[in-house]
Amino acid sequence: MNKKITTHFDRATQFFLPFFTILGFLLTSLKRPEFGLIFNLLAQIFWLYSAWQAWKKADQIGIFLTTLAICAITLYGVINYWLL
């Protein structure tokens, strides 16, 4: 990936990761879990990127594996609410 693009995505990740995660939890706590799951699934894009970077730079594979599991669970929740 281009260094300039990576730098911009790193900066965007610092904003969008907590924004989508907090919004997802907020919507879930306000009894809107179907929308909370959507926003948490959007957050998973940034969680996966951050966890991948943590694995590659600091050998933190546990963070990456946990993020993969949470991503799969959240995706199942979205499918369960919106498609089944």
Image (cartoon, helix red, strand yellow):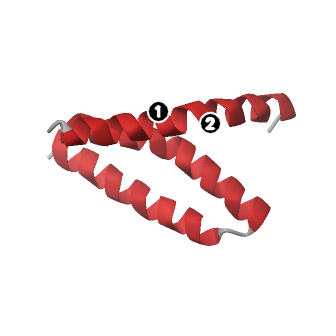
Quadrant including the N terminus = top right
Q: In this view, does 39 lie to the left or right of 32?
A: right
**Badge 1: residue crowd in 10 Å (few <14, some 14–19, many ≥20):** some
Q: How far apart are marks 2 and 1 (CA)?
A: 9 Å
Q: What residue type is labelled 1?
A: Phe
Instruction: Say what secondary structure mark 1 lies in.
Output: helix
Location of residue 28 by image quarter: top left
Q: Which amino acid does label 2 sit on?
A: Gln
Residue at x-position 73% and y-position 69%: 59
**Number of disc labels:** 2
What residue does disc 2 label? 14
User: Relative to 8, does residue 58 appear above or below in the rendering?
Assistant: below
Q: Is residue 62 left or right of residue 34?
A: right
Q: Which of 53 and 76 is in front in this view?
A: 53
Residue at x-position 70% and y-position 36%: 10
What residue does disc 1 label? 19
**Badge 2: residue crowd in 10 Å (few <14, some 14–19, many ≥20):** few
User: Relative to 36, does residue 65 appear above or below in the rendering?
Assistant: below
Residue 84, horizontal then vertical, whole percent: 14, 47
Q: Does any portion of residue 83 appear in the rendered image?
A: no
Residue 73, horizontal then vertical, whole percent: 33, 58
Residue 25, horizontal then vertical, whole percent: 31, 42
Residue at x-position 61% and y-position 56%: 51
